[in-house]
Amino acid sequence: MTDRDPEATLREWKASMQAEHEQSIHAPDPEADHRIGAVAQVSYEVTYALDGGELVETARERVADGDPELFSCVCGVRGMTREEALTHLQALD
């Protein structure tokens, strides 16, 4: 058995993953395809009426557009902020 602190191991793993993430953002592979994508959530207000014992949708109105918070690149870099995605693409110039 080892006397290694599991919390220390986790901290080291997280630090190495964060460093790898930063490296991927700031030094993208110039040979890879780079297209940024994101998913935005849109909110609707939906109203219903009772019809034959069932709820039936009677109206749907879009009430809010959402801006994506996390971006990804087709090269495999995920979980970027808008600024990181911009940096990722600018690093190719």
Image: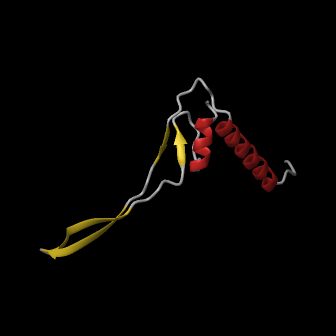
Q: How is the image coloured?
A: secondary structure
Q: Is residue 55 left or right of residue 8?
A: left
Q: Nearer the viewer, residue 91 or 34?
A: 91
Q: Residue at x 44, y 59 (%)?
A: 66
Q: Where residue 39 appears, x then y in whole percent?
A: 45, 50
Residue furthest front in the image: 93
Position of 38 relative to 41 (above/below): above
Residue furthest right in the image: 3
Q: Residue at x 53, y 46 (%)?
A: 71
Q: Quadrant of residue 27?
A: top right
Q: Where residue 43 appears, x then y in whole percent?
A: 37, 63
Q: Residue at x 87, y 51 (%)?
A: 3
Q: Is residue 14 left or right of residue 31?
A: right
Q: How many marks?
A: 0
Residue furthest top in the image: 31
Question: Which quadrant holds the C terminus?
Answer: top right
Q: Where residue 85 appears, x then y in whole percent?
A: 58, 43
